[in-house]
Image (cartoon, grey):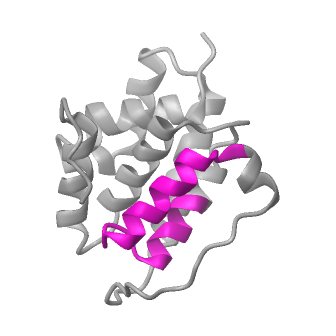
Amino acid sequence: MKESILDVLLYLFEHYFTEDADIVRDRDSLQNGLLQAGFSPAEINKAFDWLDALAEQRPHATSPRADGPTRVYFGPELDRLDVECRGFLLFLEQHGILDADQRELVLDRAMALDQDELDLDDLKWVVLMVLFNQPGSEAAYAWMETQMFADEPEPVH
């Protein structure tokens, strides 16, 4: 089975993170559960490194600014994130779901997935995981979760 870091992260997120916080603190039982689910030790370690880097990079609590800096993408970012992904990040920032620091954290974590390309669904999962890890982002997380699992997306006005 060819799995990626994102596959491991999604499995963790869907099966552990949203259910029981005590299980999340026990890395050994998480690792054993992932091994039993068929993931390779190398991909499991990369996923844990990804999560550790996410935890270390929490932005400082600031109020979101609607007039924040405009993000200019370059090089590998343009190669991995298509126009739809970049537009989605801009949409999230303009609507106050992400602030500039969170956007940068999403970009950092998306680039750390070590995939040649990310589609919009992959990026949405990264956004959801970043928001899940951000204190004070509960409303943004709930909105994002609703958008991902709703049958029809919320109309944009």
Q: Position of residue 20 (x, y in %)?
A: 17, 43
The front one of 157 and 90 is: 157
For the point 35% across and 90% down, the residue is 62
Left or right of residue 142: residue 82 = right
* Residue 85 magenta: yes
Percent across and percent down for residue 2 are 63, 15
- Residue name at image x 31 percent, y 67 percent: 97
The residue that appears at 38% across and 63% down in the rendered structure is 92
Quick check: 12 above or below 95?
A: above
Q: Is residue 55 above or below residue 39?
A: below
Tell me if 5 is positioned left or right of 142 in this view.
right
In the image: residue 128, left or right of residue 47: left
Q: Which residues are magenta?
A: 80-107
The chief SS type of the magenta part is helix
Residue most extreme to the right? 75
Looking at this view, is 29 or 73 the one in front?
73
Q: For this rendering, which residue is in front, 50 or 98? A: 98
Q: Is residue 146 magenta?
A: no
Residue drawn 40% across and 58% down? 130
For the image, the number of numbered tags is: 0
Q: Position of residue 38 (x, y in %)?
A: 49, 14
The quadrant in which the N terminus is found is top right
Among the 4 quarters of the image, the one containing residue 59: bottom left
117 vs 85, left or right, is right
Quarter of the picture containing the C terminus is bottom left
Q: Quadrant of residue 64?
A: bottom left
Q: Is residue 29 visible?
A: no
Q: Can you tell which quarter of the image residue 148 is in?
A: top left
Above or below, comparing residue 61 to residue 31 in the picture: below
